[in-house]
Structure formats: C-alpha cells, structure tokens
Image (cartoon, rainbow, N blue to C red):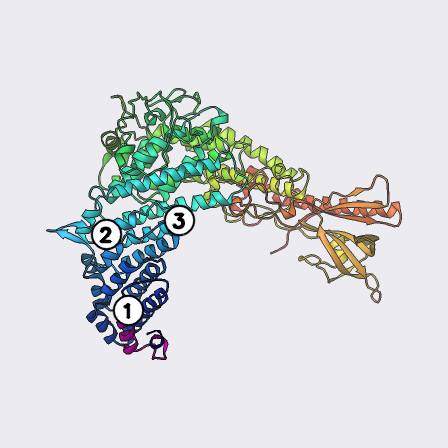
C-alpha cells in the first residue's frame, strides 16, 4: 500500500485524485503509523480540487460523485491526533477560498457538511488549532451572499432560527489574542453586508443582539485600561500607542457595523455607547475639582469623546452627546453616596473584567438623579463674561466644564477640551441648531442659515440677517435641542426638574469667545495648543470687532505687545518648522520645557524651542488683532525687504553671494585672522578665521590659505554666527571659545518616540570651538569682529520685522505693495 502511494504518478491528474480518494476511504483507524498519509492525502486533495476548478470541471464532479466531503468528516471523527484536524480545517479553507465556480461553492455549503465542521467540538485550548478554525470561518464568510447564506442557516417559516457560522464566530469576539478578534470582526462584517432581511432580524433578536452591547462593554474595559496606563505618567509610550490604536480600531468597527445598514443596529449601538460608556463613565469624569485632581482621567475621557464623535457616524449619537453637554455634571453622577464615577483612580467605580451577558447588567437609567438647573450657573455673567465660578460646583454644565478647562487647565486639559469643541464643530451628523446652542456655530453657517430663512419669508431670519447683532439676537433655538433632551429623559432616564434647561446662543457664544480670548492671552500654555484655540476662535468670528468687548480687546492688545517685546529679545535664535500633531497627542503632548528633558537652559536647543514657541504665539495674537480691527490677512507678512550691503562690509570683501560659504569653496581672506584649532586630540590645524554676516544670516568660517593664490583660501568648516556666544578664556587671553549651534531642531512629536521621557535628543548638546591666536591683540580683534557681525545681523533682523512687530504700522502698510523704511538711512531697498 505504502509503495503504491509513493510511486511516481502525474501530480495534477484525475487519476491521482481518484487514487487519493480511494486510499482515504480505506482508512478505518488513524494512528501514529498512518497519520502522515492522511495528512498528505488531505493536503493533496485540496491542491487537486483547486487546480481542477480552474482547468478541468471533471475534478470537482468526481469530488461530488464520491462525496469526498463526507469522507473528510468521517476521517475527522476517527482522528485522535492534532495533525489531522489541523490539516482538515486548512484543506477546507483552501478549497472554499480558492473555488471560483458558484456551482462548487453551493455544493460545499450544502448537505450540512460545513455546518458540521463549524459546530464540531475542537480542542480550542490549542492555539494553533484555534487559529486554523478562525481562518476557516473567515474563508466561509468571504463567500457569503444572498444565495449562499441560505445554505448555512436553518429556518422556520420565514425566520432564521439557527446560524452556526455567526454564533460560533462571536464566541471568540473577546478573545485575548487580537488577531482572533480581528478575524471574528471580519466574519461578522461579511455577514452584516449580505443584506438578507431574515438574517438581519436574527442577529438583532434576543439573545444575539447582546453581542453589540457586549462589544461596548469590552470597549469600556479597554478604555479604563488605557487610563490606568496613562496615570501615573508612563515611562514608555509604545504600550499606550498600541492601546490607542486598538481603541480606534474598535470604533472604526462600530462604524463599519452601522454602515452595513441593518435596521435597529445603529440604535442598539447608540444605546449601548451612551448607557454603558458615556453617561456612567466619561461624563462623570469631567468633573471640576482641585487643581491637583483636575487631569486625573479627564484627558482620557476627552480623547474618547473626540474619537467617538469623529469615527462613529451616527446622527442620534452625535446629537445626544451634544445635547447632554447642557446638563449639569451631577446629572450623570451615581446616586449611591452622590460620588462621581469615572476614571478617577478607580474611586467610586468598579468594573468586572468579564463581558456581561446582556445590556441590562449595565442599565443605569434607574441610577440617574434629577438635578435642578438654572440657565445661569453661579458666577456666570448674563453678558457672557468670564466663567468665574467655584471649581467644585456640581451645578456647572458639561459645556461650562469644558470652557473651565480651557481657561484654567494645563496643556493636556486645554488641548482635550479644544479638541472636543473642534470635533463637534466638524461633525457633519450634528444639527446646526445644536452648534448654535453650544455657541460654536461658525459665522458662515449662521449667515447662510439666516439668509435661507429670509429668502423663504421667515420674518425672524430676515430681521436677524440685517440686524447689527444678527448672530446673537435669537434665543428661540431650543426646539431641536429639546427633542434630544426628551430622548435623554425618556430613553436613558436622565432628566431635569421642571425648570429644565435654558439655552441662549447669545450667552453661550460670548462664553466660548471669552474663554478662547483668555486662553490666547495665557502665558503658561504651549504655542501648539494656543494655535488650536486660535483656529477655533477664528471659526466663530467675522471680520469685525463687534464680537469682542472692551476687556477682550485690552487683553489681546496687552498680550500682543508683551510677545512682540519677547520676540525682539529672541531674534537671534534659529528657526524651525513645527510638525502637525496626531490626535494621540491629546494623551501625550510634546514636552514644552527643555529642562524637563535634561537640556541645559542656555543651550541652542532650549533657545530654539523658546523662539519657536514665541513666534507661534506672536503670529496667533497678531492675526487676532488684524481680525478684531476688521482687516483681512495679507498673503505675505508685512516686513521690510532686504537692504543693500554696506560699503566695505566683510561679506562684500570676502566675495560671498547670498547662498553663503560652503565647505570646499573659495573665499577671499582680506579680513581673516590666522588661528589654530584641534578637531582631534593631538592634531592641531592652522586656519584663517572669519566672521561674516549677510542680511539676516551669518557664519563663522575656517579657511585654509591657498599657497599659490595669495589672499584666497578654501573653506574647511562653517558654523552659524547666531548664538555663538564668543568668550575669551579667563586664564589664556589668546584663546577664544565659541558655541556652535545646530542649524535645525530635531523632531519633537512624542507619538513617534518609542520611549517617552527616555529618548535622548541628539541635538541637545551644543558644539564648541576653541581657537588659539598668536597674541592677545589678535584674539581680541577676532572677538570684536564676531560682535560687529552679530550686531549687523541683529540690526537687519530688527529692521526687517519692525512693521510686523508694530501693529499700527502693519495696518497702515496693508494697502501698500512695497515697504520702504523711513527711519533707516543706511539701507536702500532693491528695485525688485
């Protein structure tokens, strides 16, 4: 028998298939002796059937005639070893996945053979077997359509009563192995997109609909695990990035499920997200507490709210979340002891690791409390003034809590709150009336809406459109919002006392603008975060100062002047562009203080960071000033053009062009000073030293004199003149110390750091040159040359940016195409 099996035969022939099938039918027991043959026979049959499907239909006809699928199942029952079930699952998976003929697929799915394999009691303790089984389910689901699905379900009348593929797949939906969970999701999505009404009714019936609520419960546990990773601040970011990626993948899966268009699924997922996650967990954690407790869990909640709004495209979900922001914090507090639940060091909240069997286990609608609410919370000015309230007040609405974080929070809290507001503003599923009620409806949308009302003859719209205060004259916008408040009360059990909520777009809009103006004037917030606040403020403002009160204008003007003065002090620092941050930076924003990373405060890296921050904040404040004066931003900043070189300047004498000196290029050495320097221990080199400035650029140059070309040399080393900090040695008057700065800043986005807080920045340490001159007089002349060139460069920088720093000058020059300085007699502008 064994000899005949291994003797040469055409590998891809019907005879080979017939032979293998015949030998397989003769197997009555499987043991260590013949299991190798059985495994090889199963593998070869899969190979032959796949080949025949593409080249010779008689292969599959033989497969059907001999009922080989039945032989497969018989062999499986005989097997007591792991290798045979593994190979059988792989064999069927390969066949199903590669068969192109619809006739062949129909046969494979008929006669209950596939369902028998799906429900067979495999030993899933073996990880390899589980992997093959999940791949087998995924292969089957890939062939599902309206016709094939009927072969895998059992029906009673018009109703599906059994669907083993779906039921067995979701058993592993919460497996600890992420690859298994991913495969199960692929199976379920293939089922959802079949579009069979009876199947859709089956998956949304009890108990199968619990799968969706269990998904949210599992997501909730992952959210809590993420918060534990963040608090306290971790040493490594890699684990957090992995957790965040999986959380976002889960939300994309929710959205994919909803997009399949199955009736009631969107409602089930909406209810689950609100009842299991948002109302009992995320909203309560947004409470305002003492400063030391303010960010514990709040940032995680803000991040999750942003992700849910941005990824899960459900209209009701987005609008209910927005409508709930008008509720006081206490409305979402557990009634037991009145303690706020949430991420706060797990105090007052417990969570079982097991996924619940049904949603009612987490049904919180009976634990919500009715809280009296006034439209003007304590400390709120009716004219939309600053939110001056007691930070511990539970009467603050969630919307006001977000603004409180903007005004008083640190970088994390401000960025998270701004991200929520910006996400709401950009959520297409959100009704415009909701944005208007929140006070964040962009001006262009307000005017468009009022214009439409005026065109169709609605008096209120026409009055508002042509009113000087058209943006704020309308308080009757709460009808649409009340619809969602009613849903929150009736469906989720969260309600107010009869006083209900008062909504005034006038008050709320001024509150938002007030908070954003205060933010833009804060000095303890990073420039990156301020830019986000500036962007949001710009969306809310037309080109008019009528949106600001006198206090706003005074704050902005004072802050602009302060940063203009600070910028003047830092103009010698190097320039750097800022990479755009990923959403993950809500959780791990960039470090803004150089000293935190062990970088010396006086180093170039610290100066670059400081200059970068100052410039971004100045540009933000400058643009806001332009907006408040009703002017449009110019395409280019208002600065003076380059001036001509002074006669007898060193740059002109050295023969440099605007590109500056480069290593290996020739340079005239008329003003150079001879010196010695050792770049390697024991290897001293003789060079000619020259300090050169050209406009707003400057260089330190070491050149080697050409022996055959008098007064000319070859550039061997070049360093930036800016920030070189020349210093004559205290003990050796012929030594001159120079700090050598890098020409650019390294990438500072922490999302790309593998070890946050441990990553060493290569450019954090400045270079150093120590030049030795022949006598003290020569050393001093080199020092004076450097100082003179630095002053020239600094003066040119100040001259160029003068109109930018002076707001009045910038406004006056807004209509001029050429900027000619009136107070600079030593400079002449180029004709071009």
The residue sitting at 24% across, 21% down in the picture is 498
Q: Residue tagged by mark 1?
A: 24
Q: Quadrant of residue 535?
A: top left
| Secondary structure mostly seen in the magenta stretch | helix
Question: In the image, is 646 to the left or to the right of 813?
Answer: right
Q: Residue tagged by mark 2?
A: 164
Q: Nearer the viewer, mark 2 or mark 1?
A: 1
Q: Quadrant of residue 286?
A: top left
- Crowd class of label 2 (few under 14; some 14 to 19; many from 20; radius 10 Å): some
How far, Cα to Cα, is label 2 from label 3? 22 Å
Report helix, strand or loop for mark 1. helix
Report x, y in % for residue 788.
76, 45
Q: Residue tagged by mark 3?
A: 178
User: Is residue 425 in sight in this rendering?
Assistant: no
Residue range highlighted in magenta: 5-23
Instruction: Examine the structure image and report whether residue 61 is included in the region drawn in magenta.
Output: no
């Amino acid at each position: 028998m064994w000899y005949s099996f291994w003797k040469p035969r055409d590998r891809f022939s019907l005879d080979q298939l017939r032979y293998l099938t015949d030998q397989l039918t003769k197997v009555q027991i499987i043991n260590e002796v013949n299991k190798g043959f059985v495994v090889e026979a199963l593998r070869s049959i899969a190979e032959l059937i796949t080949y025949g499907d593409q080249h010779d239909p008689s292969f599959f006809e033989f497969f059907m005639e001999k009922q080989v699928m039945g032989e497969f199942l018989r062999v499986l029952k005989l097997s007591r070893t792991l290798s045979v079930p593994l190979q059988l699952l792989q064999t069927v998976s390969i066949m199903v996945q590669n068969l192109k003929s619809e006739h062949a697929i129909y046969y494979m799915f008929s006669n209950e053979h596939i369902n028998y394999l799906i429900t067979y009691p495999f030993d899933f303790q073996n990880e390899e077997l589980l992997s093959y089984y999940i791949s087998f389910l995924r292969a089957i689901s890939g062939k599902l359509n309206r016709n094939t699905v009927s072969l895998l379900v059992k029906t009673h009348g018009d109703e599906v009563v059994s669907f083993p593929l779906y039921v067995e797949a979701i058993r592993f939906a919460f497996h600890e192995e992420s690859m298994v969970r991913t495969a199960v999701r692929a199976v379920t999505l293939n089922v959802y997109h079949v579009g069979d009404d009876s199947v859709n009714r089956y998956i949304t019936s009890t108990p199968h609909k619990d799968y969706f609520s269990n998904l949210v419960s599992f997501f909730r546990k992952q959210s809590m695990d993420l918060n534990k990773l963040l608090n306290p601040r971790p040493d490594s970011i890699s684990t957090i990035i992995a957790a965040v990626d999986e959380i976002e993948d889960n939300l994309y899966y929710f959205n994919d499920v909803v997009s399949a268009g199955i009736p009631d699924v969107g409602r089930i997922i909406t209810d689950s997200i609100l009842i299991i996650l948002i109302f009992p967990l995320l909203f309560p954690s947004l409470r305002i507490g003492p400063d030391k407790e303010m960010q514990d869990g709040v940032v995680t909640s803000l991040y999750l709210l942003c992700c849910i709004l941005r990824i899960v495209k459900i209209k009701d979900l987005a609008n209910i979340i927005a409508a709930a922001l008008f509720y006081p914090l206490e409305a979402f507090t557990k009634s037991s002891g009145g303690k706020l639940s949430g991420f706060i060091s797990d105090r007052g909240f417990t969570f079982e690791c097991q996924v619940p069997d049904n949603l009612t286990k987490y049904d919180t609608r009976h634990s919500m409390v009715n809280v009296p609410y006034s439209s003007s919370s304590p400390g709120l000015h009716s004219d939309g003034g600053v939110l001056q309230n007691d930070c511990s007040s539970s009467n603050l609405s969630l919307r006001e809590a977000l603004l409180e974080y903007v005004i008083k929070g640190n970088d994390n809290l401000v960025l998270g709150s701004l991200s929520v507001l910006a996400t709401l503003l950009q959520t297409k599923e959100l009704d415009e009336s909701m944005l208007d009620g929140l006070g964040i409806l962009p001006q262009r949308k307000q005017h468009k809406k009022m214009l439409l009302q005026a065109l169709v003859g609605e008096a209120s719209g026409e009055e508002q459109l042509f009113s000087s205060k058209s943006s704020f004259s309308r308080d009757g916008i709460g009808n649409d919002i009340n619809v969602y408040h009613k849903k929150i009360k009736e469906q989720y059990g969260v309600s107010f006392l009869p006083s209900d909520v008062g909504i005034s777009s006038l008050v709320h809009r001024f509150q938002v603008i007030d908070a954003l103006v205060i933010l833009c004037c804060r000095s303890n917030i990073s420039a990156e975060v301020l830019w986000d606040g500036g962007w949001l403020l710009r969306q809310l403002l037309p080109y008019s100062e009528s949106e600001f009160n006198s206090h706003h204008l005074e704050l902005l003007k004072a802050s602009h002047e302060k940063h203009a003065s600070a910028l003047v002090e830092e103009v010698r620092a190097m320039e750097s562009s800022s990479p755009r941050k990923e959403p993950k930076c809500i959780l791990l924003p960039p470090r803004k203080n150089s000293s935190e990373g062990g970088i010396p405060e006086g180093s170039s890296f610290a100066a670059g960071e400081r200059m970068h921050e100052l410039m971004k904040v100045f540009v933000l404040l400058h643009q806001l000033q332009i907006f408040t004066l009703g002017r449009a931003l110019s395409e280019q900043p208002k600065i003076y053009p380059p001036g001509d070189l002074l006669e007898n300047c060193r740059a002109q004498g050295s023969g440099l062009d605007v590109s500056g000196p480069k290593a290996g290029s020739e340079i005239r050495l008329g003003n150079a000073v001879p010196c010695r320097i050792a770049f390697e221990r024991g290897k001293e080199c003789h060079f000619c030293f020259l300090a050169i400035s050209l406009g707003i650029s400057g260089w330190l140059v070491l050149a080697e004199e050409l022996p055959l070309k008098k007064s000319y040399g070859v550039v061997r080393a070049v360093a930036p003149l800016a920030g070189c900090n020349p210093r004559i040695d205290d003990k050796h008057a012929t030594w001159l110390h120079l700090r050598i700065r890098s020409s650019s800043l390294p990438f500072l986005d922490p999302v790309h750091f593998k070890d946050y807080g441990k990553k060493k920045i290569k450019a954090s340490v400045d270079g150093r040159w120590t030049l030795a001159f022949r006598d003290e007089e020569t050393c001093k002349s080199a020092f004076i040359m450097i100082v003179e060139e630095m002053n020239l460069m600094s003066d040119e920088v100040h001259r160029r940016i003068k109109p930018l720093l002076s707001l009045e000058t910038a406004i006056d020059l807004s209509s001029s195409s050429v900027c000619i300085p009136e107070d600079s007699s030593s400079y002449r502008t180029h004709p071009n």
